[in-house]
Image: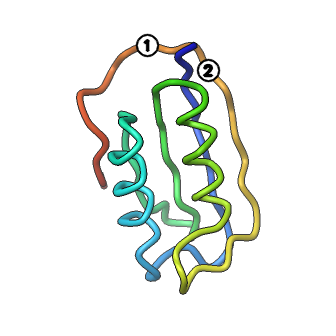
Amino acid sequence: MRVRAHIFISGRVQGVFFRDHTQKWGSYLGLTGWVRNLPDGRVETLVEGEKKDVESLIGKIKQGPPLALVGNVDINWEDFKEEFDDFRITW
């Protein structure tokens, strides 16, 4: 089953290669969407793909890259829209 997840990550998640980490794992898992920094210090990502792969990415997000300290991960499940062609870092 294909799903879409809109995710907000807080903690020490900017300046620690979090977007790069998320983009690389998302692409590796065959997911599509984007990841970006927010002005309030959080990271936001919108991801689409097979549910098991999205859940795998969420596990990698909760772990974070080595320099990150993930505080909270808010996940909003949405209807799959097949809106993206790849997984990229955006502004």
59 relative to 65 in the view: left or right:
right
Quadrant of the rendered image containing residue 86:
top left
Q: Which residue is mark 2?
A: 78
Q: Position of residue 39 (x, y in %)?
A: 49, 65
Give the alpha-carbon distance from disc 1 to disc 2, as whole Å.
Answer: 9 Å
In which quadrant of the rendered image does the N terminus lie? top right
Residue type, label 2: Glu
Q: Which residue is mark 1?
A: 81
Alpha-carbon neighbours of circle 1 within 10 Å: few (<14), some, or many (≥20)?
few
55 relative to 80 in the view: left or right:
right
* Label 1 SS: loop
In the image, 39 versus 51, the foreground residue is 51
Give the residue at the far left of this rendering.
Answer: 85
Residue type, label 1: Lys
Tag 1 and tag 2, C-beta contact below 8 Å: yes
* Label 2 SS: strand
In which quadrant of the rendered image does the C terminus lie? bottom left
- Taking 78 as reference, is 17 above or below it? below
Q: Residue at x 41, y 46 (%)?
A: 26
Alpha-carbon neighbours of circle 2 within 10 Å: few (<14), some, or many (≥20)?
few
Q: Position of residue 23 (x, y in %)?
A: 36, 54
- Taking 78 as reference, is 28 above or below it? below
